[in-house]
Structure formats: C-alpha cells, structure tokens
Amino acid sequence: MKNDLGKHVRAGAPEKEKFDMNMPPIKQKMYLMPIVWAFSHIRQWLHFGKTDKIRMEGVKPPYIMLCNHNAFFDFYVMSAAIAPQRGFFPAAVDDFIGRERILRKLGAVPKRKFTADIGMLRLCRKAMQEKMIFGIYAEARYSLCGLTEVIPDSVAQLLKHEKVPVVVLTARGDHIYDPFWGNHRKRYVAPMRATMTQAFTPEELETATLDEINARIKELLYNDDFRWQSENRVKVTYRKRAEGLHKVLYQCPHCMTEYKMKSKGDMVYCEHCGKSWRLNYYGELEASDGNTKFKFPTDWYKWEREQVKKEVADGSYRFECEAVVNDLPNSKGFVRLGRGRLVHDMNGFSLHGTRDYDGEPFDMEIDSAGQYAVHVEYDYRFGNYRDCIDLNTLEDTWYVFPENCEFSLTKISLATEEIYNEIWRRRRLESGKKNKEEK
C-alpha cells in the first residue's frame, strides 16, 4: 500500500467531515489584498507582462469576468488586472488542500469540476448584490496544450440572466511558461501579454441571442499559445522544453501508433517507428527527417481529436482498466478508498471497486450525456506523481489512478468531449426527424 499513497494521502476510513459547499463566500479581506496585488504586479513585471484594456473605460463592479486558463500564473494576471477591485472566484476543491482558510479569505469558493452546481448561481448573485466581481475560469481546468478548451454554452445563459457588464481576460504565454504537461518545471518567458475586454454592456446583452453571446465569448477567449509564441518570436531556450509533451501528443502521426510517444530534452519521438521532432526556441515542431506534418503541438492535438472523433462516431471507443481510487472529502487531503475497475465508453464513466478499510463495495456512475468534459492530471503531485482522472459528483471527488495498462489521459479527455458532442448531435437529429413527422 505504501507505494500507492503519496503526500496528503491517508489510509483508513473516510472522514465524516466534508467540504462545506454551501458556506457563504467571504469577501476578500482588505488587509490581504495589497500583498496580493503587489506580488501579482511584481510577477508580471519580471516577465515584462502587460495587460491591454479594450472598452474598459468606466467599467466598475459589479460585473462578471471570464478568463482563459493555462497555468497558475493566470491568477497573478487576473489579480493585477482587477486591482484595486475585489471579487469571488470558484476554485477546484483540490486547490484547497492544506490551505482552505487562506483561500476562503481570498474570495475562493470550492467547486467540484464539471458538475451542475446551482450554488454557483447563488454565488454569482451574491457577488452582484455586493457590487463585486464574479470571476470564472470558463474552461474549468488548465488547458492541456495551450489551446482554449471547451467552454459550455450554459455560460451565455448565466450572462443573459445577470444583466451586468461582461469582461473577458485572455492571457497569452502562460502555458509556455508553465505547461500543464511540463513535469512541474517552469521556463522563463518574456514578454507575456494579456487582453482585458468588455465583451458586452448590459444593454448589448439584452438584445443579443444566446448563440451570439456564446460566439463572442469563445472568440475573445480563444488562444493558441504555441502559435502566439511563434508569431511574436518569443524565445524559450530552456533545454528540456519538450519534456512531458508526449503526454499530450500520445499518437504518432507517422505510424499511427498510440501510447508509444516519448520526450527528452527538446525532442519528442515515437518508440515504435523511430520518427522524432524537435521543439525549437519558438514553439515550432521540426521533424528530424525534414517531413513535418504539424508545425505546432496544438495542430497535432487537433488532429488527435479528429482521430478520437472517428472512434466515437463508429462506436469503437472504449477504455477499461484497473485503478487505485483516492477520495477527497475535505481540505485535509486525500483518503485511500480502494481498488476498482474503471470503464469509459459511450455510456460515460463507470467505476466499481472495494473499499480498503472494510471490504464493502463502492461505485460511481457518470452519464456521458451530462458530462461535457473531464478533468485529468499528468503526474499528479498528491498521488506519487502519477497520471489520474478526476471524477466528480455533487457529493464526492475521486481521483482515479489507472494502472497495469497503456493509456493516455489526453485521449480520455478528448473522448469525453466527443462522446458528449455525438450524443447530443444524435438527439438533435432525432428531435428534428420527430418534429418533421409530427408536422
């Protein structure tokens, strides 16, 4: 058991105490904010960071701010951009491990990822009533590859309902500085840039359709960090800049083999066919044989999505494995739940196992039609640096560590999104046919 448990992971029966998801949010403590603002400005200054503001004249709280999410550095960009204003900010429950008290004082509120939590609506209403900012990282997770991830259409409904100004903050360069796949190693990146734009006034929201709101938000939040790096000639000389990139680029486009990609130094290579690519100083891929199919890792990532989409469309996608499961009941850390078997297919996620502490069964079922995305972690620090899948219901957060199998978290993430898209595409087609028949 010792090898399965990492820092902040305990053995034994789960605690009765759970995260209080209904605790009223705490207004950011004013005595802490000068420290936060000063530190955030310093961090930006060290990277020659700058935030350009567009249509922001006269915009004051209350308003809703939507941000893209590439790295922890995003929080410094956001704090510096809104200073000296304050707000409430939903944050993933694992962010609260060992620091719940200070995070709540900084305006953070725990949220279980990709769950339909009505409490967020109440939180947003409270922020508006207290004339504060309600900040949302709309992707609800770090970008896997520096490319804007899925933004749910429900965002438009929230904005339309609240009838307050909508501000979009898009940071660029943060993924290059601290990539999600980067083995927890940061690179020096300068200059870093961000854009803060008033996307809608209350009057514009009133006349805009939900489709128009979603389209505008997605347009403003869109970011491709590798392409941005190349176009702006932002040089990264870190010698190990490609290490970990194989976590995202899991399928070789040359021989089509999955799970045999590796990386070392500034190189990504396929163990099956031997083809290799160098990630140069400007975030561009260069094939060793001169035949480079994808100039940027983000283009490769988009291609992988298309491959997964084909599997989902023909019904051949399925992932099954043994797994170790850790429960996160509260901010004290994880509790080892037990071992089980995880299945991911067109029906969603199905996890069944046996608890270590009493031998009783546990299970979690997540319907694919209700889950538009899933959170994954490469080399998660609280699991002996192992890849894991974060599964959530409104009551539980389980971190699932696949083992004794070949797999890619990136593929599981892409499949979750494409299964959701396929299910709802089929339902729309069926609904359309039914309406025609009734007419």
Image (cartoon, grey):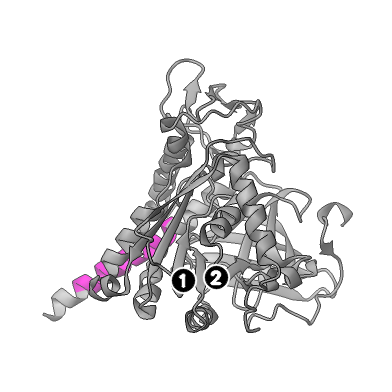
Residue at image coords 47%, 80% = 128
Query: Could one spot residue 149 in this view of the protein?
Result: no
Residue 30 is situated, as x and y percent measured from the top left of the image, at 66, 72
Q: Is residue 424 magenta?
A: yes
Q: Quadrant of residue 62?
A: bottom left
* Residue type for callout 2: Ile
Q: Quadrant of residue 94?
A: bottom right
Residue 194 is situated, as x and y percent measured from the top left of the image, at 47, 48
Residue at image coords 34%, 59% = 55
Seen as rendered, the residue at the extreme left is 439
Residue 289 is situated, as x and y percent measured from the top left of the image, at 48, 15
> Magenta region, mostly helix, strand or loop?
helix
Q: Sort mark 2 into few (<14), some (14-19) or many (20+) by Cα contacts within 10 Å.
A: some
For the residue labelled by badge 1, is the local secondary structure a helix, a strand or a loop?
helix
Near-viewer residue (129 or 7): 129
- The C terminus: image quadrant: bottom left
- The N terminus: image quadrant: bottom right
Seen as rendered, the residue at the extreme top is 289
Is 115 left, or right, of 302 in this rendering? right
In the image, the segment drawn in magenta is 418-433
Residue at image coords 26%, 64% = 212
Residue at image coords 63%, 35% = 188
Which residue carries the number 2 mark? 366
* Residue type for callout 1: Gly
Q: Is residue 224 magenta?
A: no
Is 358 left, or right, of 159 in this rendering? right
Q: Sort mark 1 into few (<14), some (14-19) or many (20+) by Cα contacts within 10 Å.
A: some
For the residue labelled by badge 2, is the local secondary structure a helix, a strand or a loop?
strand
Near-viewer residue (121 or 181): 121
Q: How many marks?
A: 2
Which residue carries the number 1 mark? 370
The answer to whether mark 2 and mark 1 are in CB contact below 8 A is yes
